[in-house]
């Protein structure tokens, strides 16, 4: 299917559907924000693939949504997806389930650390990483990523310094990284995991964006780095939800390869008021992994074209703006600090341009003047957002 056919079939209007992105604008951005062009929240304006819709419809027609088991076929389908794409066949006994990756991060923190223990993040990073630590009565420790000319890298010295000085017990790794847009190389992962192994730090690797990579980049799960050298310290979290736009089906994976860690997690989980595995989430995920690859290929093409258009047009029309790299995820950062005083970013973006975006300071204290844009959307919205930024900056400074 060519791009235009895909867009005609799968782009949907989400206003008036209880969409957080569109119908929740005032709740997020304040009174009078209903008319903002929504470029925030990590979900898509694309209807999910036909196979998922059909699988959910078939399950619905059965009419019973009672307690269910995970079928053997599910484990096989998931393992084949992971092995074929990432060289990581997942054994049935390694797999546990959660209602979402952020929830799973919270569970990992509570299962494997104690109140007052230090947990490390690399900023700027998805803001629930900050909140899930502090709301769990753990100490939040930050190691800044290095930033230069739109590109982020890990600062290994800062990571080790933070671990040693704060006696860090757990490292929350975002891979691919949101919002830095990086798909970490195996060399980078090897270096940071070696530091964690050296200092007996458990690694929670949130890999929810694993399937959304560009430019020939290769995603490497933390658990397979250097032939699985660090597998015994890695707790892997992933899901089909970002890949196939399934977030509120509430279904994600916890992969624990180490037997002792699994036993410890299971003891913790036995004390929770646990929910059952989502029958609809399972049905959707199986169908997506079995029949959704062509749809995903089309989505990735649209996202990459949106990114290319954003970068070329904005940097040309708004000299000084820097669209940061996008190797993975669909959520690039835009550095506007050369175009607007950082403290006036919201005035420009929200009040003048009428855009609803994620602001850089939500991801890290040093990133006021950055915004994050969602490119898993209609290309017309991206073009409109870019033009509003160009026109709004000229108006603001009367150029």
Image (cartoon, rainbow, N blue to C red):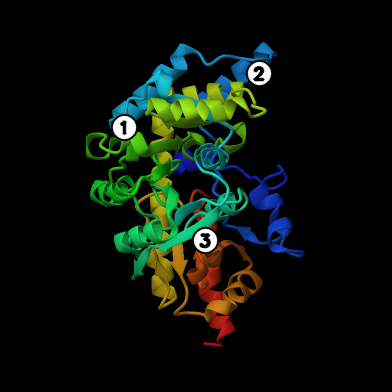
Q: Residues within 10 Å of mark 1 (few under 14, many from 20)?
A: some
Q: Is residue 27 above or below residue 297?
A: below
Q: CA distance from mark 3 to mark 2?
A: 39 Å
Indicate which label's residue lies in the foreground, 1 or 3: 3
**Front residue of this view, candidates 237 and 61:** 237
Q: Residue furthest bottom?
A: 398
Residue where numbered disc 3 is placed: 363
Name the disc covering residue 60, or none. Answer: 2
Residue where numbered disc 1 is placed: 85
Q: Residues within 10 Å of mark 3 (few under 14, many from 20)?
A: many
**Front residue of this view, candidates 288 and 87:** 87
**Quadrant placement of the N terminus:** top left
Q: CA distance from mark 1 to mark 2?
A: 31 Å
Judge whether residue 50 can be spotted in this image.
no
The answer to whether residue 264 is left or right of residue 31 is: left
Q: How many marks?
A: 3
Q: Position of residue 375 (x, y in %)?
A: 48, 53
Say which label, 3 or 2, has the lower sequence index: 2
**Front residue of this view, candidates 333 and 261:** 261
Q: Position of residue 194 (x, y in %)?
A: 27, 47
């Amino acid at each position: 299917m060519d791009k235009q056919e895909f867009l005609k079939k799968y782009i949907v209007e989400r206003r008036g559907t209880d969409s957080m992105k569109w119908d929740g604008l005032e709740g997020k951005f304040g009174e009078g924000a209903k008319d903002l062009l929504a470029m925030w929240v990590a979900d898509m304006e694309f209807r999910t693939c036909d196979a998922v819709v059909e699988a959910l419809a078939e399950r619905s027609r059965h009419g019973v949504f009672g307690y269910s088991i995970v079928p053997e076929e599910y484990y096989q389908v998931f393992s084949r997806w992971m092995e074929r794409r990432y060289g990581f066949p997942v054994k049935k006994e390694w797999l546990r389930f959660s209602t979402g990756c952020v929830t799973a991060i919270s569970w990992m923190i509570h299962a494997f650390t104690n109140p007052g223990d230090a947990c490390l993040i690399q900023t700027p990073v998805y803001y629930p990483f900050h909140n899930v630590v502090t709301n769990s009565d753990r100490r939040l420790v930050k190691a800044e990523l290095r930033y230069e000319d739109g590109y982020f890298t890990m600062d290994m010295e800062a990571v080790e310094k933070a671990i040693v000085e704060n006696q860090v017990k757990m490292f929350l790794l975002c891979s691919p990284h949101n919002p830095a847009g990086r798909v970490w190389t195996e060399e980078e992962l090897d270096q940071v995991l070696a530091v964690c192994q050296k200092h007996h730090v458990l690694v929670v690797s949130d890999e929810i964006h694993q399937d959304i990579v560009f430019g020939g980049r290769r995603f490497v799960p933390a658990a397979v780095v250097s032939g699985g050298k660090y597998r015994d310290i890695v707790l892997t979290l992933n899901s089909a939800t970002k890949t196939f736009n399934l977030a509120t089906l509430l279904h994600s994976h916890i992969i624990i390869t180490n037997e002792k860690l699994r036993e410890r997690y299971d003891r913790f989980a036995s004390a929770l008021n646990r929910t059952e595995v989502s029958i609809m989430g399972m049905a959707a995920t199986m169908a997506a992994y079995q029949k959704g690859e062509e749809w995903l290929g089309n989505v990735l093409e649209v996202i990459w074209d949106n990114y290319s258009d954003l970068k070329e047009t904005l940097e040309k029309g708004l000299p000084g703006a820097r669209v940061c790299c996008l190797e993975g995820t669909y959520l690039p950062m835009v550095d506007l600090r050369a175009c607007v005083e950082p403290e006036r970013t919201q005035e420009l973006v929200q009040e003048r341009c009428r855009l609803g975006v994620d602001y850089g300071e939500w991801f890290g204290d040093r990133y006021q003047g950055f915004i994050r844009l969602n490119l898993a959307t209609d290309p017309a919205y991206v073009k409109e957002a870019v033009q509003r930024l160009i026109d709004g900056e000229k108006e603001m400074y009367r150029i």
